[in-house]
Every structure is written in C-alpha cells, then in structure tokens.
Image (spheres, rainbow, N blue to C red):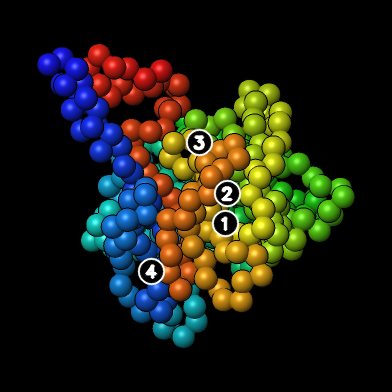
Amino acid sequence: MRLSILVISFLLVTSTLQGKIVFTSYRDGNGEIYVMSSFGNNQTRLTNTDEADAAPAWSPNGQQIAFNRLLLNRKGDLNEEVYVMDADGGNQINLTHHPAYDNFPDWSPDGTQIVFVSDRDSRGNPNIYVMDADGGNVTRITHLKWAGPAMWSPDGLYIAFQASIDHQGLQIYVVDADGTNRWQVSKPLPELPNKAMNFEGWSPDGTQILYQATIGGTVIDPILMIATLSLKRRKAVKHELVPVSGVDMAGATWGADGKSILIALRKAKAEELEWDIYRFHLPDGPLIQLTNHPASDYSPREWNHRLPVSPQGLTPKHWGEIKSN
C-alpha cells in the first residue's frame, strides 16, 4: 500500500513537471508569439496582430510575458516598443511609448524591473536601460558605442550583454546591476579574427553564460560556447565548446533544467529559411526536435518553477519522503 501511494505520487508530480516554452513564429505570415509545452506539444498562438512580435521573455512567476512589437508611427516610420501581456496573451500593454527603438526585454529575478535595449539617447547607438515593470523610472546603465541584448543574472546582482568596445569587435560583458564594474566574459579567437560573439543567456544557477561565435553575425557554421564564471573574481575561468555541428543556428538559450539548451536551427545548406526549435541535452546530445513547421520558429525561452536551482542553491522538495538533492 505504501509503495502504491509513492508510485501514484511520483506519477502525479512528474506529470506537472512539464514547463512551458514561449517562442516567436512566422507560421501566420508575420512574427507572432506562441507558447508550447517543454516537450513541443500544445503549440498555441498568443498574439494576433498585423505588426511583428518577437523576443518574448517570461516573468519570474510565469504569469506574464514581455516582448517586442514593431509598429508604424504616424509618419509611416518603423518603431519598436516593449510590450507586456498575460501568459495567455491577454491584457497587452505598451510599456515604453517612445519614438526610438526599444527592444529585447528581460525581467529581473524579483519581477519588479525589466532590462531592455534602446537608442533613445543616441540614434543608431543602442545601449542598455532598466525600467520598472510598469514602464516607469527608465534608467540608462551603459554608455557605449553599441550594446545589445541583455539579461539579468538569476540572483539579480549582475547584467550580461554583448557590446562593441575598444575595437575588440562584438564581445560578451558582465556589469553590476547598476552598470558599474564591467568585465569581459567571452574568449577572443585570434585564429578567427572576424568572429562576433553573441550573448545567449545565463544558466539557471547563474554560474555559466552561453554565447555564440559567428562570422560577422551570420548564422552559418556558428560556434556555441559556455563560459564558467567566478563572479567574486569577476572572471571567466573556463570556456567550453558545445558540440553541435552541421547546422545553421539562429540563436540558443538555456533550458530551465540547466542541463539542456534550446536552439533555433536548420540543417546546414538548407535552401529554405525553415528554422525549427530543438533541445540539445548537455554535454553531447541527443538533439531533440520540438517544432516542425515550414515557417520559421525561433527565440525560445523556457519557464518551469520546479526545475531551476535557486540563486541560493536550494533544491525544491517535490515528494513527501522522497527528496531530491
């Protein structure tokens, strides 16, 4: 009887461990935000507009999604804004309301702030900004020639981003949450001087950063890297190659379990622009396809409150007498 109860409890809990992946798809003719389970089923469209929606990001509690929306202003010029909506697609709100480009939002771990990219203070020269989750108190935290997408560390103390500084080309950097104490994460590749480093995200436990080395920012034959960090020393202590080969890659991000990577890819030399989302299990596979559509699916971000290790290293307990560690 006791064993039966434990088995039933295990089945009930593991059935709820399934998380959610939000992503961008062009399957309806323009960029829209979709959501699916962590296994790729139940694919559901959340936005349905004439504009292009992209770069979705979960709030820490999984109840909201921030994203970009590309609009036409009254003069007929393109304008990109940061929006937020409920996890079911309802209650869509423009947070930025600015004629400049505002894009690539990411939530602080406590859900009170959003970091984003804008060129509002210097057109054509984007930098990193932070605002309250309701769009108030916008603050610029970098003053660089060019700074790209940024994400908060899981403990909320740091922000990582890609930037072009001191003629080094595009590299990955980390700063304190207020923009101070900048240090470099990515490893230069002297043998491939034209490689540009693209930031892809923090590991759920905050100890590693995923980034992609590309030739001039293209998607052809990229190199996916993981940098292990010593945050106290402000230093990357190890760089490892992720062994994904024979594919073109339009971006990657950590899975919520910290043991896999979500990748938007196509087979090398494919004629069509058909990007699908895959899960790559570290350290060396397998590669599992999650979407399969003639149009492009990309920008996956996974949320699952049960799986990530907390910033304090605490492990959630799922069953009464059965405890994970």
- From the image, state whether disc 3 or disc 1 is nearer to you: 3
In the displayed orientation, state which residue is furthest to the right. Answer: 191
Q: Determine the secondary structure under disc 2.
A: strand
Q: CA distance from mark 3 to mark 1?
A: 17 Å
Query: Which comes sooner in the sequence, label 3 or label 4?
Result: 4
> Quick one: 261 or 234, which is closer to the camera?
261
Residue 133, horizontal then vertical, whole percent:
36, 48
* Residue that numbered label 2 is attached to: 200
Q: Which residue is mark 4?
A: 32
Kind of residue at disc 3: Lys
Classify residue 5 as left or right of residue 266. left
Q: Residue furthest left?
A: 1
Labels 3 & 4 near each other (Cβ < 8 A): no
The amino acid pointed to by label 4 is Glu
Tell me which label, 2 or 1, sits earlier in the chain.
Answer: 2
Mark 1, other Cα within 10 Å: few <14 / some 14–19 / many ≥20: many
Q: Position of residue 241 (x, y in %)?
A: 69, 42
> Which of label 2 and label 1 is nearer to you?
1
Q: Quadrant of the C terminus?
A: top left
Residue shown at 41% from the left, 33% from the top = 308
Q: Quadrant location of the N terminus? A: top left
Q: Secondary structure at mark 4?
A: strand
